[in-house]
Image (tube, rainbow, N blue to C red):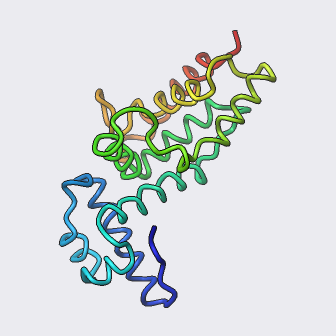
Amino acid sequence: MSEQPSSTRGAATYRRVIDAATQEFAQYGIAGARIERIITAARTNKAQLYGYFGNKEQLFDTIFFASLERITNVVPIDVEDVADWAVHLYNEYLARPDLIRLATWARLERRPIGHLVAEHERYDDHKLRAIAEAQDAGRIRQGDPFDVMAMIIAMSMAWSPVSNVYAATAAEPPHVHDQRRALLRDCVRRAVAPK
């Protein structure tokens, strides 16, 4: 995808482009994002941006896949307590609403049906194996592991920036988030409890 620079100065420019482009794509999507705004915010030029990333589509890919990797690494699945995993996802959406917005733009502009990413780019294989093993051990209800995972993730996104009901922000009072976390934890526990 992208070629990261080896010099300290080049690495700083690369990071500024990533940060500026993340905000641009999160706000405007792929079609609405403008390279001119990105290079202005990143204090660079088109030649340098294209040298690192190739084109706007490849820049989006770099950012999008990094966001998937971040969620996977920052909020690893815990099949011993998938309700707690859902709460950690909720927390991450509060802290980094841009990550969920990037996934939404990818869904709207690239893959309106089926999996969000191509089979060879998926980041959920280890999650599916973990859910299947927990099902085999009788700790999680039976069913397609992907459907179980999708349901848990959807529940964690109930108040995310892509909610069609209400988008929460980190600026809301802590007790409001605590109430939502408690509700989410209880609902997920009930939903995945073995029958």
For the residue pair 78 and 159, the one nearer the viewer reads as 78
In the rendered image, the vertical position of residue 97 relative to residue 15, given as above or below: above
Q: Position of residue 16 (x, y in %)?
A: 36, 75
Residue ID at (37%, 68%): 19
Q: Residue furthest top?
A: 195
Which quarter of the image is occupied by the C terminus? top right
**Extreme right residue here?**
137
User: Of residues 20 and 132, which is closer to you in this image?
Assistant: 132
Q: Position of residue 59 (x, y in %)?
A: 36, 65
- Relative to 64, residue 134 above or below: above
Q: Is residue 72 left or right of residue 179?
A: right
The part of the image, by quadrant, that contains residue 43 is bottom left
Q: Residue at 41% of width from left, 51% of height from top?
A: 99
Residue 66 x, y percent position in the rendering: 48, 59
Side of 32 relative to 5 (left or right)? left
Does 98 sit above or below residue 41? above
User: In the image, residue 140 lies at what x, y percent?
Assistant: 70, 21
| In this rendering, position of residue 140 left or right of residue 98 | right
Q: Nearer the viewer, residue 178 or 108?
A: 108
